[in-house]
Amino acid sequence: ALDALGQAPDRTVSTIEVREGLAAALQVLGASDKDDQAAREAVQLFREVAEHPRRDATQPEDEAGLHFNLAGALIALMQRVDAEEAQRLEDDARSALLRA
């Protein structure tokens, strides 16, 4: 669906914005339902969004928000994984916060 949206000739919302919204929804779903897969998918989508900033992100606060959202998703997932993976996620979250 995201690929089809990206190919639509008259789109008003970018695929990055759609990914960001989907990531937020998956993060909430993962937290409320204790759904590890949804939490992992949220992290992956937030990573993609942070790597490809939105075109309309003209203010430093917009860019910071992308990295802050990624850090939040990483921290949420940290609480569900083993200690070794949690340490990697914590390191990634710290890096994201430093970029925010």
Image: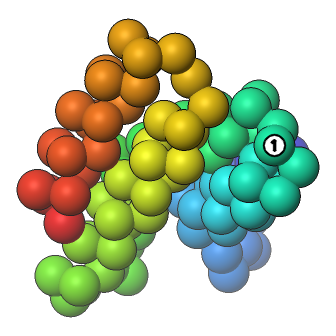
How many numbered badges does the structure rendering display? 1
Quadrant of the rendered structure where residue 99 is?
bottom left
Specify the farthest residue to the top: 84
Q: Nearer the viewer, residue 69 or 56?
A: 69
- Residue at the location (77% across, 48% down)? 30
- Residue at the location (74% across, 62% down)? 28
The image shows residue 35 at horizontal and vertical percentages of 82, 38
**Disc 1 marks which residue?**
34
Q: Can residue 49 be seen in this view?
A: no
The image shows residue 60 at horizontal and vertical percentages of 16, 82
- Residue at the location (63% across, 45% down)? 42
Q: Nearer the viewer, residue 8 or 26?
A: 26
Amino acid on which disc 1 is placed: Lys
**SS for dot 1:** loop
Name the side, left or right, on which 29 lies relative to 70: right
Name the side, left or right, on which 29 lies relative to 14: right
Name the side, left or right, on which 75 lies relative to 2: left
Quadrant occupied by the C terminus = bottom left
**Image: 26 above or below 38:** below
**Image: 19 above or below 12:** above
